[in-house]
Amino acid sequence: MALWGGRFETKPDELFKEFNDSLPVDAALGLQDIQGSIAWAKAIHRAGVLSAEELAKLTTALSALQAEIASSPALPLSDKDEDIHSWVERRLIEAVGDLGKKLHTGRSRNDQVATDFRLYVRAEIDARLAELGEARRALIDLAERTKTVVTSGYTHLQRAQPILFAHWALAYQEMLERDAARFRDARTRVNVSPLGSGALAGTTYQVDREQIARDLGFGAPTRNSLDATSDRDFVLETLSANSIAAIHLSRLAEDLILFASQEFATVEMHDSVSSGSSLMPQKKNPDACELIRGKCGRIFGSFATLAMTVKGLPLAYNKDLQEDKEPLIDSMRQLSMCLRVLVRVLDTLKVREDRARQSALDGYANATELADYLVARGIPFRDAHDIVGKLVRLAIARNKRLEDLTLGEMQEVDRRIEGAVFDSLKLETGLSRREIAGGTGLRAVALAIQSARGRLKG
């Protein structure tokens, strides 16, 4: 059902109608459209447009339609309708007759869709916050399970210094915690009510916009009708938060893919989140993590799509803004799937303690501890750095670890090295010297786990 036909003598071209109609996409906003319509019915009742009896009939019919949508996996869409608003209005008129035509009094589809979309984005943010909370919980639980597992930390994808595996898990927990903060912050700017802004100039009916905002759970009404009907900053900001979260998930997935490879072999993914090869029977592929990594591009692409759509739009509403929903809806669905799958990956992840420790023992990851030992003996750090570099070169040449060099071999490089040096080269020694807040020491990590869990519950 078209909501604007009086001005036109001919029907829309069929190809244009297909091009123009958005119902297959914005049908996702059905519940929000009815929620906004009930609030608007109350508002125009308070303004004297509807009687109490008319309000009761409309809200009863709208509530029944709301229940139908909530219980149905797919709406009975019709090519009679160009969008979700016309679908709801047609169904309402079928239920209550001409009374249904009064509901749109003083309202434009411009402020209607802006309201619906804000309600939808707010609900999606709340759902992502819950899923982020579960992913953070899974990372904290993984940290708890691995709080004594020593592994190698990396820079430039080269073995760098020994760390606890839990320290690695908590690093990603920090990223997801920031993501949650970004979503909460974005939500405050989503949570304003455009209803009552009309097409662009406000409505002549004396509706109480403050009360409308309260009825819909918004913090306040928007302050400018031109901005209210054309603003999509709240969508861009949410898509930005989605994109940053997806980047973090992609980095986490990449680490796990590397760690699960035979070259690293420090973790093993559960069969339930892996797949095999149609040709090579021995393969166990980390498809869950590879898909998480792959979805990042799609999610970030949604942000770029909308940014390019709105960058040159004049005030106020333009039909270009019909293209705002598909990127947001798809981005949210993909991020949701990634977060939920990630929880299953993490909860079933097996960390191979022996391989993890071996990775810390190999690669001269204790070289910094040796430099610190020399500094403690009064040698300037730059000189100590040079000495240790020569010792590493010597160890490589003799196919030994640093701790496997004899004292005599070490003293070939510098006579000031003494027998106590070997204590400094133990993995546990290096960890014990990093009990600073935020460090990878056993106590520091245990406190970090406790703190992260407390913040999650808070």
Image (spheres, grey):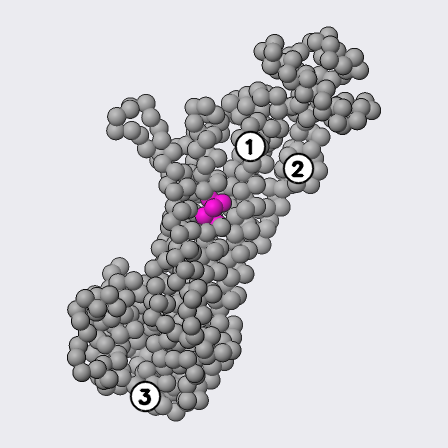
Q: Position of residue 284 (x, y in %)?
A: 35, 28
Q: Tell me, yes or no, if residue 175 can be seen here.
A: yes
Q: Where does the magenta region start and end?
A: 245-249
Main SS type for the magenta part? helix
Q: Earlier in the sequence, mark 1 or mark 3?
A: 3
Q: At numbered mark 2, what does the secondary structure look like: helix, strand or loop? A: loop
Q: Quadrant of the N terminus?
A: bottom left
Amino acid type assigned to the residue bearing label 3 in the image: Glu
Q: Is residue 455 above or below residue 143?
A: below
Quarter of the image where one finds residue 409: top right
Q: Position of residue 4 (x, y in %)?
A: 26, 80
The label on residue 452 is: none
Q: At numbered mark 1, what does the secondary structure look like: helix, strand or loop? A: loop
Q: Tell me, yes or no, if residue 68 can be seen here.
A: no
User: For mark 1, does the 10 Å Cα neighbourhood hold few (<14), some (14 to 19), or many (20 or more) residues?
Assistant: few
| Residue 453 falls left or right of residue 68 | right
**Residue on which disc 3 sits:** 53
**Residue on which disc 2 sits:** 439
User: For mark 2, does the 10 Å Cα neighbourhood hold few (<14), some (14 to 19), or many (20 or more) residues?
Assistant: some
Looking at the image, how many numbered discs can be counted on the residues? 3
Q: Is residue 360 inside the magenta stretch?
A: no
**Residue on which disc 1 sits:** 156
**Residues under numbered marks 1 and 3 in contact, where contact means CB atoms less than 8 Å apart:** no
The foreground one among 6 and 207 is 6
Q: At numbered mark 3, what does the secondary structure look like: helix, strand or loop? A: helix
Residue farthest toward the right in the current orientation of the protein:
378
Amino acid type assigned to the residue bearing label 2 in the image: Gly
Amino acid type assigned to the residue bearing label 1 in the image: His
Q: Earlier in the sequence, mark 3 or mark 2?
A: 3
Residue farthest toward the top in the current orientation of the protein:
408
Q: Position of residue 358 (x, y in %)?
A: 55, 21
Label 1, label 2: how far apart the Cα atoms are = 20 Å
